[in-house]
């Protein structure tokens, strides 16, 4: 069974897409997508031997080898052109953008589902600056908070405001309970630091500004 994080990503894939799951590890996601009948073809890509072999074995054990190709490869470098939904999940921002930068020639309408463990605000900025429009966003809690972004390559991207980059253009409008919990939790963490700093310190003032901006967004 998929974790809530992977299940949420699975739910964000449009039926019938040809998926390339980059950094697939066990290939859990592509196998589930194929077995559920949501998609018919996928590439399960990993650049390390162990995960690649695990993926290959799981694909075979699930009887999906005719539909899922396991690839030992670096990122998107050799992913075939027909893969119209790329998934990059469970990595840091730096690794995710190294992978995306391998394909500067992305076709309009290409889809991307990305979940970075850190630097989700930088990820949004990168997407905007590289012609990716955010079309769906989810936040979940499963031991940690995870934000998942779905983006579409477009001819002309709608610019994000700074609060869209910080909080997510769709998440900040929807303000669901997990999102609110997450930002209240961030406020608590920031407030703890402020309380430990010298009163009136520059750092304290910066953090207080951040707390105010989160509060404004939550109450806005
Ligand atoms: C933490 S696992 C994430 C597995 C799965 N995507 C998930 O979200 O649960 C990260 C995987 O990405 C792979 N990886 C890291 N850099 C990669 C790259 N440049 N190309 C392909 N795979 C990569 C690692 O080998 C590892 O199996």
Image (cartoon, helix red, strand yellow):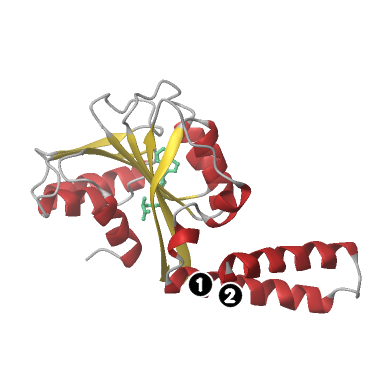
- With 23 as the anchor, is 33 left or right in this view? left
- Number of numbered markers: 2
| Mark seen at residue 180 | 1
Identify the image quadrant of the N terminus.
bottom left
- Give the residue at x 47% y 60%: 173
**Circle 1: is it few (<14), some (14-19), or many (20+) Cα within 10 Å?**
some
- With 216 as the anchor, is 110 left or right in this view? left
For mark 2, give the secondary structure. helix
Nearest the eye: 79 or 164: 164
Relative image position of residue 91 (x, y in whole percent): 47, 49
Relative image position of residue 192 (x, y in whole percent): 73, 78
Relative image position of residue 64 (x, y in whole percent): 11, 45
Image position of 153 with respect to 8: above or below: above
Identify the image quadrant of the C terminus.
bottom right
Task: Find residue 21 and report its image quarter.
Answer: top left
Nearest the eye: 5 or 165: 165
Image position of 71 with respect to 209: above or below: above
- Give the residue at x 70% y 71%: 190
**Circle 2: is it few (<14), some (14-19), or many (20+) Cα within 10 Å?**
some
Discs 2, 1 touching: Cβ within 8 Å: yes
Res. 159 in view: yes
Relative image position of residue 212 (x, y in whole percent): 71, 68
Task: Find residue 16 and report its image quarter.
Answer: top left
Residue under pointer 2? 184
- Give the residue at x 9% y 50%: 37
Res. 119 in view: no
| Mark seen at residue 14 | none
Queried on whether the Cβ of the residue with tag 2 lies below 8 angstroms from ligand 1, the answer reads no
For mark 1, give the secondary structure. helix
- With 82 as the anchor, is 164 left or right in this view? right
């Amino acid at each position: 069974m998929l974790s809530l994080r992977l299940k949420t990503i699975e739910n964000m894939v449009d039926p019938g897409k040809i998926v390339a799951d980059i950094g697939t590890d066990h290939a859990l996601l592509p196998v589930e997508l194929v077995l559920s009948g949501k998609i018919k073809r996928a590439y399960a890509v990993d650049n390390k031997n162990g995960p690649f072999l695990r993926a290959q074995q799981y694909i075979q054990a699930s009887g999906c080898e005719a539909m899922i190709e396991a690839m030992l490869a670096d990122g998107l470098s050799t992913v075939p052109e027909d893969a119209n939904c790329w998934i990059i999940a469970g990595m840091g921002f730096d690794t995710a953008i190294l992978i995306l930068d391998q394909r500067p020639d992305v076709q309009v309408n290409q889809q991307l589902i990305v979940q970075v463990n850190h630097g989700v605000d930088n990820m949004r900025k990168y997407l905007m600056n590289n012609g990716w429009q955010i079309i769906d966003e989810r936040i979940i809690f499963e031991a940690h908070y995870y934000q998942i972004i779905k983006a579409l390559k477009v001819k002309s991207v709608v610019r994000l405001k700074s609060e869209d980059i910080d909080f997510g253009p769709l998440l900040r409008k929807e303000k669901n309970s997990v999102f609110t919990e997450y930002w209240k939790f961030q406020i608590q963490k920031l407030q703890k630091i402020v309380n430990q700093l010298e009163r009136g310190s520059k750092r304290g003032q910066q953090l207080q500004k951040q707390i105010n901006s989160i509060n404004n967004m939550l109450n806005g």
